[in-house]
Amino acid sequence: MSKDLFQAPDYYQIDDLLSEEHKLVRDAAREWVKRDISPIIEDYAQKAEFPKQIIKGLADIGAFGPYIPEKYGGAGLDQIAYGLIMQEIERGDSGVRSTASVQSSLVMYPIWKYGSEAQCEKYLPKLASGEFIGCFGLTEPDHGSNPGGMVTNFKDMGDHYLLNGAKMWISNAPFADIAVVWAKDETGRIHGLIVERGMEGFSTPETHNKWSLRASATGELIFDNVKVPKENILPKKSGLGAPLGCLDSARFGIAWGAVGAAMDCYDTALRYAKERIQFGKPIGSFQLQQKKLAEMITEITKAQLLAWRLGVLRNEGRATSAQISMAKRNNVDMAIKIAREARQILGGMGITGEYSIMRHMMNLESVITYEGTHDIHLLITGLDITGLNAFK
């Protein structure tokens, strides 16, 4: 078992922009990843299995709803702290970060923002501690980039709602205790409902044969005449803007997380380039390898600054959905390109599980598609700058 020797690049002294609390939170997450994720993650990725024993550790480092108020079990941290935690977790593995992102931004966030006080008190503390794991049901078999076309629906039966439909590509689904599900009422209006495991007619079959996010549990949500208590509907917001608000929070975390994956690939390639001898000297002394490494650190630095500035705007309540889309798209694209270049520096060794690069590369193929595809985010920027809608 190789030791995790990761050293985080900080070419522009971005640490100077962080508070002491930010650095403490980040460093705690970094040490946890080195101790509890790096030694096991390759094995779990090979087995295509999620390491459930890490859930308590994720809770202990504040990865579940770090910005949720302390009265509901959260850490009461700011958005930059949240981003830094996601960065460090994805440095370990994108699938593990997905688990934390879903729990925080797609389950705890909507309950906190759109739920009743009773719902907050019932669910948030258990989600923050990891006693409950949640998932988010928006994407459907026939409706991904167009979630407004969803067919999952519920009917008012007097003393309860009757929910029917299906969701797919749902992280955490196979073992989630609750699901925040988005469905249309009889008028076609979209609402969020909290569905609990054990409700009759609710099943979560696991998705197998993935080449990406192999250490993350993915599944479907099937609703066959599920009776949902009326107190389980999220009362404070409805319409498509409700789930999209959750996605803003998740995409923000991804923009930071992708930087972590890129940092790990760069650090691995840099160390290898200094140690690998060919033609009598380290390959890092050759111009083409230096070109690759110099471009990597440049792109990482730009992405770090983009994420930090977005965090400042989020803290001030001024970040727009379009700004978040830009950061998600840019930073994931940056990370996947760095993974590919880093793999080349390692040559044949780059495809083995002895190094993290190929796993990151495969994971990022999912990250570049989920929470809004690469192309859709480009069109969101296009709409924002032109005012012309390319979706219709």
Image: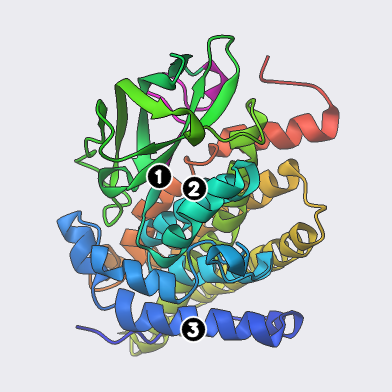
Q: Is the magenta stretch mostly helix, strand or loop?
A: loop
Q: How crowded is mark 3: few (under 14 residues within 10 Å), some or many (20 or more)?
A: some
Count of marks, rendered view: 3
- Amino acid type, mark 1: Cys
- First in sequence: mark 2 or mark 1? 2
Residue 333 visible within the image = yes
Q: Which residue is nearer to you in this view: 380 or 315?
A: 315
Seen at 34% across and 52% down, the residue is 362
Residue sticking out furthest to the front: 159
Disc 2: CA contacts within 10 A as few (<14), some (14-19) or many (>=20): many
Quarter in which the C terminus is drawn = top right
The picture places residue 111, in percent across and down from the top left corner, at 55, 46
Tell me what residue is drawn at x 20 percent, y 40 percent.
208
Disc 2 vs disc 1: Cβ atoms closer than 8 Å?
A: yes
Which segment did they paint magenta?
A: 136-149
Give the residue pinned by disc 1.
135
Q: In which quarter of the image is the N terminus?
A: bottom left
Relative to 286, is 362 above or below?
Answer: above
The residue drawn where x is 46% and y is 63% is 128
User: What residue did someone put label 3 on?
Assistant: 28
Marks 2 and 3 sit apart, C-alpha to C-alpha, by 24 Å
- The residue wearing badge 2 is 107
Mark 3 residue type? Ala
